[in-house]
Amino acid sequence: MIQLDTPRKFKPLVRQAQEVASEVLRPISRKYDRAEHERPVELDMLAAVIDGMNEGNSEVGGTGATGVRRDAVADPSVNRNGTNISTCLSIMELCWGDVGMLLSMPRQGLGNSAIASVANDEQLKRFKGRWAAMAITEPGCGSDSAAIRTTARLDGDHYVLNGEKIYVTAGDRADLVVVWATLDKSLGRAAIKSFVVEKGTPGFELARLEHKLGIRASDTAAFLLKDCRVPKENLLGDPSINPEKSFAGVMQTFDNTRPLVASMAVGLTRACIEEMERILGECGLKPDHDRPMHRQPSAVAEFVRMKADYEAARLLTLQAAWMADNTQPNSLQASLAKAKAGRTCVDVALKCVELAGSLGYTETNLLEKWSRDAKILDIFEGTQQIQLLIIARRLLGKSSAELK
Amino acid sequence: MRPIAIRAEMRGIPILQPPAELSRTMTTLTRLGLRTLSQMAGSPTLDRLGLRKPTEKVLYHGTKAGFKTVTAVNRAFKAVQKLTSPQRLPKRGGGGDLFDLRPTDDQAMIVEAMRVFATEQLRPAAQKADTDYGAPTELLAACAELGMTTMGIPESLGGVGTERSAVTNALIGEALAHGDLGLAFACLAPAAVSNALVLWGSAEQQATYLEAFAGDKPPAAALAIMEPTALFDPFALKTTARLVNGSYVINGVKSMVPLADRAELFIIAADIEGRGPALLVVESSSSGLSLEEDIAMGLRAASPARLVLQDVKVPASALLGEGKAEVYAECIHLSRLGWCSLAVGCSQAVLDYLVPYVNEREAFGEPISHRQSVAFAVADVAIELDGMRLLTWRAASLADADQPFAEAAALARRLCADKGMQIGSTGVQLLGGHGFVKEHPAERWYRDLRAVGVMEGGLLL
């Protein structure tokens, strides 16, 4: 039966996450925006709490780091609300607090999500409790992750990695980095594998930390891999090169994580919307949902338009997560959600700054920070343009060779 | 004469010819006298602006038509049974504790029936109905046979309804509008009236009217909210109802009234003596009612027209929902959701039409869908369309769960008005010149989708 409310059973989780966001993240939000590259130590204690939350309830995901494993196809007559939805809901709340902080949450890295999603049982056990970052992007390739040049050569019991990785979120603070490398450049996508590299491995060098537009609380690292030897048991998933499956498998991780990134955008958008509502209230303006918009002040009309877009982004995200929970293929819906949420959070945050005037443009208010933080959400884990490509190819039945 | 006028005159409802703007011209001409008329006849301006024919027509009809008081040929609405209390359908209720996007089996079945009807009956009839400014009577009868009104009427009143669900109605609207938005409007207009009577009607109103809507040949009917005012606000009406000796006397003009020429029953929104807006049940046989042609750019299959009320007298018992402000507000919200559901259906039709078109249409030696500028525009349609649908469903499901849904409805309306129109525009744009001609339905959908941000009333989920 069609019902789009927040599932009742997740309400305690949402409340808990909301408390964390307002009591822990918000108060230190500006501090670490100013102190880029400084480790938010306040998060260490919080991470322990989140570990507990994740352990405690298998159906309730925290920040996405528990992974989004797909179960066997479920009975279609049974409606399931599981980790995909709960993770999205909790991320929305935490990112209402601070997106950069969520990305800096110890042991909640994207690498953890990848490990949890594709690692075998032995690996799961071995890497448990470690903080893992994810290294895909290179100076010469971003969106076209199939074009990566970092190589992995099998040498006895080790893979030898060589190359350069940039834009590694939490790369400095994490214990592990999941590195994408190719076993054989001539074999294209199928030969791309992910390797868990321990910090401190000889040949794995931190090159620099980036200075960024936003999400400054989160460190973004660049690494050099020079004959970096990684035990061959650290290759995640299947080591064989299967042109039919391998890359699709890697990309499938993105189908599952795209709604999580969309959730980040939704959370940030809600922060802007709520702040804007407060500011409008101070100006004596409040939307009247009975009367037509063209009879109300233009700031109010803008606000309602933003909120409608926010709702669309939010519900598209929940739709994608709900489909994942019910083992329905959701690649299309995951991209619809990411595309809408990504563009909406940028539009809304920037519009709020404009409406709030100098109050929004200066550091007295968090709106200016959010408008800087927002931009990355329309870029990482697949840019707006990549989402449009995925959506269009699916709708039109086009290959990547036809619709470039 | 246009079909709408012919049909109405056949039924004896007076048609006010000509349309208002031209009628003003006419009055002015009469006042200025024949000298001015002859001067004007010689004026090149008339030819330059292409006004000669319309003006001549005005002058012709001005002498021939005018106000006539005719008794409409209607069924006599009479209380068939004595009801001690109004019969309401139980609201479907909340959907339980989980997020769920699956329709129930019942809903899926109804929607499938509507989908088949829309594909086989509505789509093929759409273009002609648009041109004719009206839907064929047989088609509307076929639609009524599908149970469009009976489905929402309790069994105790002769209907087949067991629960009241805005979600079900939204799904129906969506399915029908996928066939054609204008025809969907025509099909669903009577249900707006019967739904309103089920929701808010008194025992007497229900006993008098609902049996007819539950019968084999439900009457045409219309929920008339709009008025011909720019920046129209349904909460600030110009139409007034004054209580005089136990009767309401209604004066005003309602615009975009669907099926106005054949409706036997209206629900009229009027300001009740400064107490604010409320709804009144008005039979079309009431004296003082007349029609004015007011040709619309879209929704033409529902032959929308102006309904002029001049000292129309109805008993005090015609007031719907005791004139409560919350009833009127709920009516407006449910009506807007109706428009959202049609916007979703029509936008889906646009997307379904675009996909094969851009794949088959070639330019520069390959399908135009191989170009990002085209492909991304299609992707944008899909993104916004899904958002429109989810917002509409959410508001409707809140209504079913008896929770406040005013804000959800307002947001759905905003998104559907904005994005629906954008989708309608993309539909024409990607077809290029082909989108601009009537060989393809894109131009009709463009005109119809403009209505979503304009309309108030007419539908009620």
Image: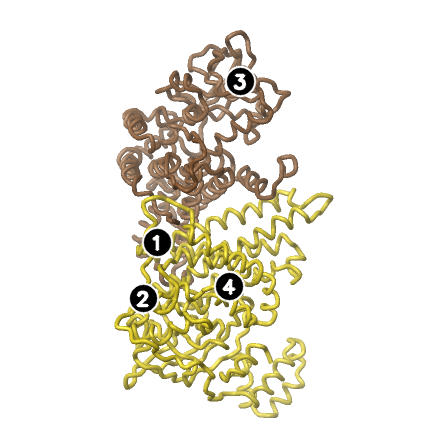
Chain colours: A brown, B yellow
Residue at 67% across / 78% down in the picture?
A: B47
Residue at 65% across / 38% down in the picture?
A: A402
Q: Which residue is mark 3?
A: A239
| Marks 3 and 1, how far apart at CA | 50 Å
Between B253 and A154, the residue placed more toward the observer is A154
Say few, some or many: other residues with alpha carbon within 10 Å of mark 2 (under 14 / 14 to 19 / 20 or more): some
| Secondary element at image label 3 | loop
| Marks 2 and 3, how far apart at CA | 66 Å
Q: Which residue is mark 1?
A: B398
Co-location on one chain, circles 3 and 4: no
| Marks 4 and 1, how far apart at CA | 24 Å
Co-location on one chain, circles 2 and 3: no
The answer to whether residue B228 of the structure is visible from this angle is: no
Residue B382: image x %, image y %?
A: 53, 47
Residue at 43% across / 29% down in the picture?
A: A69
Residue B184: image x %, image y %?
A: 51, 63
Is A198 situated above or below A290? above
| Marks 1 and 2, how far apart at CA | 16 Å
**Residue type at numbered disc 3:** Pro
Q: Which residue is mark 4?
A: B184
Subunit of mark 4?
B
| Secondary element at image label 4 | helix
**Residue type at numbered disc 2:** Val
Q: From the viewer's perspective, tell me whether residue B440 is left or right of residue A381.
A: right
Say few, some or many: other residues with alpha carbon within 10 Å of mark 3 (under 14 / 14 to 19 / 20 or more): some
Of tags 2 and 4, which is closer to the observer?
A: 4
Subunit of mark 1?
B
